Image: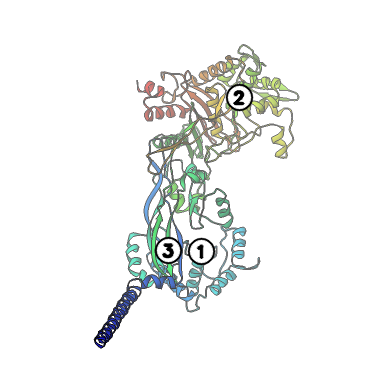
């Protein structure tokens, strides 16, 4: 029995050992299978991820350009906007690191552009062929900057600059010399535009459509070269205030770049920015907000590229002027100059220049500013030198920067000073016997007016009345009132305007001239060394219409978002100065004199009588290097003014003949106004 129990015990022990062995084998098999599966997942599924982790990964950000904001007129008509264009770019991420290979890419793409007659960006101020010379238009300061950028001494020649670029970028002698210069110029452009992974280089702007396809087809052989769609600045109507609109262009220098950065906006050297006029003044509103593209590199190769932030277009700026009215003013000015050429019994064929400014009396919003000669903004952008060198300097904006003596139009200011200080009143008279003796000098009047008061003196433009009044006022008081009216100072127009200067001892000292007490007489009638702009005199007319309140003139009405769906800001009228008027009769006397001046005899088609309302004007024929100019200022309707205006014709006469045309044009464009309703009857 015991033996039997021993055998059974031994059998169970063997059986237990067998079970343990089976369990152990099972565990080993399961572990092996699990390990194999894990290894397969690591190798087949996560292999790429582990490989990436084992490799060098870099992520770079690249800026995406934003469309520039549009500039539109008071009716929303586009003056300057954008169009979709095609630009040739070179991207650092795909451009060869080997200099020789990179030079070949540049050569290949330029060859395509040159064959099609397209241009590329190259601002290196060196001639394109030997003997190499610096461009005369560049100026010594810019050339010195080029030497500095290339680490050359101050005596380096244009040829030294080209040779330095050829050496630095290993431009092969196998290329002809002129080709070396082209490649060198583009390498220089890439250098100053901070060509990098973060900043692509725009080689050519707005290329023809047929080139787009060709470059796209060949870009696989030209590493880094691509064609992209971008918003390109487009002048829709180049005849509407081209001087005030201004221009855009690339950032030309490090100094300009640093200055722009002070605005707080992160500019790139490849950016297009405002260069003049409203494009420059409103840069912060127009520039937009660029987007961001992320580029992922693994071991030096690009594996992905995606937009992580969309660009936001610049704001739309709406102006105060109506394009139709503006172009009508320009035609009025041009036609009147043509009329003078044909005026019987006159030799005025050389008259070619002048200006007209029209303001909204309520706020001094600019309704129109014509200047002659002028230009089309498209022509300026296409051939700047042709406009620069054109006859009679069309680049000068005579409306805001033309400096003239105001002549007898200034008598309204002298009258304001006399009436408001109490030196004279509406009944005060001075005797005009045509000649006026002052110390040892005899000056003259255009008529023999006998005893004359201020209202009549304005109507007939009596010099002697204002000579006598000026003696009682003195030059300091006269200058003070001229300053009230905005003369001798910039007026704050967004696109800029000239200050001019007053005829007084301070000006004479600055000009290195001696002031004599007798000059006061000429200062009182807008002669002597006084220089004003038509804009200033239009503002003066508006100030009279507003009985001593001077508003700051402005071109910008409002700012909208890029799509022009939301108004972001509205321009409010700004009181720039206010004359402390002492009596209600001050401007009543001046206005009656100006209404009388408007009733003077004129040809029927220019007459200011029987319009259904009174017009207030004052004319002037100031002496100038051209002999005499012809000036007129005024406002209408006199009883409840809507518009103020000023016009000048250089070396001409009868500028007042344009006033009726201005009023008729205003009535046509603004038919629901007092003037519009009156002239439509």
Q: How crowded is mark 1: few (under 14 residues within 10 Å), some or many (20 or more)?
A: many
- Locate residue 227: give its quadrant: bottom left
- Secondary structure of the residue carrying tag 1 is helix
The answer to whether residue 369 is seen in the rendering is: yes
Q: Where is residue 73 in the image (x, y as percent from the top left)?
A: 41, 38
- The residue under label 3 is 295
Is residue 581 toward the left or the right of residue 441 in the image?
Answer: left
* Residue marked by disc 2: 413
Q: Which of 87 and 158 is in front in this view?
A: 87
State which quadrant residue 580 falls in.
Answer: top right
Left or right of residue 417: residue 307: left
Element type where label 2 sits in the image: helix
- Mark 3, Cα crowd under 10 Å, few <14 / some 14-19 / many 20+, is some
Mark in the foreground, 2 or 3: 3
Q: Tell me the mark number nearer the camera, choosing from 1 and 3.
A: 3
Mark nearer the N terminus (2 vs 3): 3
Q: In which quarter of the image is residue 11?
A: bottom left
Q: Please say whether residue 389 is visible from this viewpoint.
A: no
Give the side of residue 36 with respect to residue 483, left or right. left
Q: Mark 1 points at which residue?
A: 189
Left or right, 3 with respect to 103, comes to left
Which of marks 1 and 2 precedes in the sequence? 1
Q: Quadrant of the N terminus?
A: bottom left
Q: Nearer the viewer, residue 355 or 420?
A: 420
- Which sits earlier in the primary sequence, circle 1 or circle 3? 1
Residue at x 56%, y 36% (from the top left corner): 492
């Amino acid at each position: 029995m015991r033996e039997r129990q021993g055998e059974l015990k031994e059998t169970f022990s063997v059986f237990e050992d067998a079970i343990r062995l089976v369990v152990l084998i099972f565990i080993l098999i399961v572990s092996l299978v699990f390990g194999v599966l894990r290894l397969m997942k690591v190798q087949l599924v996560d292999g790429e991820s582990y490989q990436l982790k084992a490799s060098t990964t870099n992520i770079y950000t690249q800026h995406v350009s934003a469309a520039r904001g549009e500039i539109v007129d008071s009716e929303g008509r586009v003056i300057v906007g954008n169009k979709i264009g095609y630009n040739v770019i070179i991207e650092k991420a795909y451009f060869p690191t080997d200099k020789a290979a990179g030079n070949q890419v540049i050569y290949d793409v330029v060859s395509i552009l040159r064959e099609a007659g397209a241009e590329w960006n190259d601002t290196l101020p060196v001639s394109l062929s030997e003997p190499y010379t610096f461009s005369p238009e560049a100026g010594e300061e810019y050339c010195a900057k080029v030497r500095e950028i290339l680490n050359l001494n101050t005596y380096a020649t244009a040829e030294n600059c080209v040779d330095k670029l050829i050496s630095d970028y290993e431009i092969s002698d196998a290329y002809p010399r002129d080709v070396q210069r082209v490649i060198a110029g583009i390498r220089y452009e890439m250098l100053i535009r901070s060509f990098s992974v973060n900043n692509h280089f725009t080689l050519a702007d707005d290329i023809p459509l047929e080139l787009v396809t060709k470059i796209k087809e060949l870009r696989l052989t030209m590493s880094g070269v691509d064609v992209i769609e971008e918003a390109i600045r487009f002048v829709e109507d180049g005849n509407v205030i081209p001087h005030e609109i201004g221009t855009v262009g690339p950032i030309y220098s490090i100094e300009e770049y640093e200055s722009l950065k002070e605005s707080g906006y992160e500019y790139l050297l490849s950016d297009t920015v405002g260069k003049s006029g409203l494009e420059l003044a409103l840069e912060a509103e127009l520039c937009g907000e660029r987007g961001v593209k992320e580029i992922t590199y693994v071991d030096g190769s690009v594996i992905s590229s995606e937009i992580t932030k969309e660009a936001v277009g610049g704001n739309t700026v709406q102006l105060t002027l109506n394009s139709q009215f503006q172009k009508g003013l320009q035609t009025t000015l041009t036609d009147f100059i043509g009329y003078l050429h044909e005026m019987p019994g006159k030799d005025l064929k050389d008259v070619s220049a002048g200006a007209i400014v029209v303001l909204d009396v309520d706020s001094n919003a600019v309704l129109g500013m014509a200047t002659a000669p002028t230009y089309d903004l498209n022509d300026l952008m296409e051939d700047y030198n042709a406009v620069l060198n054109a006859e009679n300097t069309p680049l000068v904006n005579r409306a805001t920067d033309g400096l003239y003596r105001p002549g007898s139009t200034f008598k309204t200011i002298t009258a304001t000073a006399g009436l408001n200080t109490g030196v004279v009143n509406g009944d005060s008279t001075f005797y005009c016997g045509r000649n006026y003796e002052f110390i040892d000098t005899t000056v003259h009047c255009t008529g023999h007016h006998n005893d004359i008061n201020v209202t009549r003196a304005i109507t007939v433009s009596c010099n002697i009345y204002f000579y006598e009044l000026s003696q009682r006022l003195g030059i300091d008081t006269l200058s003070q009132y001229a300053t009230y009216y905005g003369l001798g100072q910039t007026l704050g127009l967004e696109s800029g305007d000239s200050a001019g200067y007053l005829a007084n001892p301070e000006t004479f000292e600055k000009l290195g001239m001696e002031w004599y007490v007798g000059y006061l007489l000429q200062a009182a009638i807008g002669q002597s060394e006084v220089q004003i702009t038509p804009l200033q005199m239009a503002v003066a007319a508006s100030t009279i219409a507003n009985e001593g309140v001077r508003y700051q003139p402005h071109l910008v009405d409002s700012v909208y978002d890029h799509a022009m769906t939301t108004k972001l800001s509205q321009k409010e009228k700004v009181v720039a100065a206010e004359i402390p008027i002492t009596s209600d009769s001050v401007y009543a006397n001046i206005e009656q004199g100006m209404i009388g001046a408007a009733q003077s005899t004129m040809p029927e088609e220019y007459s200011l009588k029987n319009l259904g309302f009174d017009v207030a004007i004052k004319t002037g024929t100031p002496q100038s290097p051209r002999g005499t100019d012809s000036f007129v200022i005024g406002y209408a309707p006199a009883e409840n003014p809507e518009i103020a205006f000023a016009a000048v014709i250089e070396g001409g006469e009868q500028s007042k003949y344009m006033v009726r045309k201005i009023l008729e044009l205003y009535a046509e464009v603004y038919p629901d106004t007092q003037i519009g309703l009156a002239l439509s009857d």
